């Protein structure tokens, strides 16, 4: 019997001067970066929540409280790897990941391949199984006004048993 599970993730962080913009583990040249306790990689956070959500394992804040010194300043890659480990321990593997980053500026399309490769390396997935899409917010709302950025992710898991 094939066991399929789908998971949805979303994240947002503020944009701020003097911070790096890191998306999917890739540093993007930008005048504004994402602010937060960790490296504020909204794309990795959204995928982490999607993995946790697929198996109803709670959410990123439950597993990695920012009050816990263990996780303070942690690279978000650790969060994603931990969630992926939980998934594998329960006998599931990722079929594919689809994501959207909503950022007004800078243009991200030249970074699609590096970001897909970075995610593929973290999740040990073929790049064909990793989709990364980009949208502006049409200059509307906090994302459009460059106060923040958002990321969305969907993952499909299949049971290995
Ligand atoms: O949001 P909009 O539909 O105007 O985006 C048009 C295209 O611009 C998208 O297909 C996307 O590939 C690209 N884009 C980008 N970097 C962004 C936002 C959008 O490369 N920050
Ligand atoms: Mg986050």
Image (cartoon, helix red, strand yellow):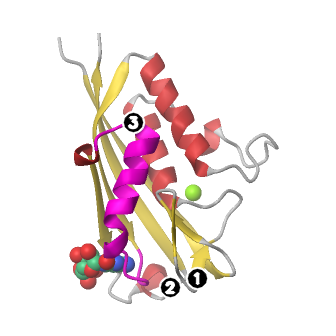
Image location of residue 13, percent across then percent down: 57, 67
Residue at figure coordinates x 82%, y 44% from the top left? 69
Quick one: quadrant of the C terminus?
Answer: top left
Image location of residue 95, percent across then percent down: 26, 34
Q: Which residue is mark 1?
A: 32
Q: Secondary structure at mark 1?
A: strand
Residue 120 located within the stretch drawn in magenta? yes
Q: CA distance from mark 3 to mark 1?
A: 30 Å
Q: Which residue is mark 2?
A: 146
For the residue pair 11 and 30, the one nearer the viewer reads as: 30
Q: Which mark is residue 113?
A: none
Q: Secondary structure at mark 2?
A: loop
Mark toward the viewer: 2 or 3: 3
Residue at figure coordinates x 49%, y 52% from the top left? 44
Q: Main secondary structure of the magenta part?
A: helix
Residue 62 located within the stretch drawn in magenta? no
- State which image quarter holds ligand 2: bottom right
Residues under numbered marks 2 and 3 in contact, where contact means CB atoms less than 8 Å apart: no
The 10 Å Cα crowd at callout 1, few under 14, some 14 to 19, many 20 or more, is many
Mark toward the viewer: 3 or 1: 3
Q: Secondary structure at mark 3?
A: loop
Mark 1 or mark 2, which has the lower sequence index? 1
The segment highlighted magenta reads: 103-126
Q: CA distance from mark 1 to mark 2?
A: 8 Å
Eyeballing the image, is 85 above or below 41? above
Eyeballing the image, is 49 above or below 13? above
Residue at figure coordinates x 56%, y 46% from the top left? 77
Give the residue furthest to the left. 1
Q: CA distance from mark 2 to mark 3?
A: 33 Å
């Amino acid at each position: 019997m094939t066991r399929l599970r789908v998971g949805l993730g979303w994240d947002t962080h503020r944009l701020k001067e003097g911070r790096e913009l890191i998306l999917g583990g890739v540093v993007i040249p930008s005048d504004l970066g994402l602010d937060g306790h960790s490296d504020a990689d909204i794309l990795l956070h959204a995928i982490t929540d999607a993995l946790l959500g697929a198996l109803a394992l709670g959410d990123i804040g439950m597993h990695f409280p920012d009050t816990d010194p263990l996780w303070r300043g942690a690279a978000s890659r650790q969060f994603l790897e931990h969630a992926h480990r939980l998934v594998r321990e329960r006998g599931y593997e990722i079929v594919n990941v689809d994501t959207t980053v909503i950022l007004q500026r800078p243009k991200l399309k030249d970074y699609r391949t590096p970001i897909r490769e970075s995610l593929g390396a973290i999740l040990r997935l073929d790049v064909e199984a990793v989709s990364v899409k980009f949208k502006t917010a049409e200059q509307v709302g906090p994302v459009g006004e460059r106060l923040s950025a958002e990321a969305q992710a969907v993952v499909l898991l299949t049971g290995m048993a």
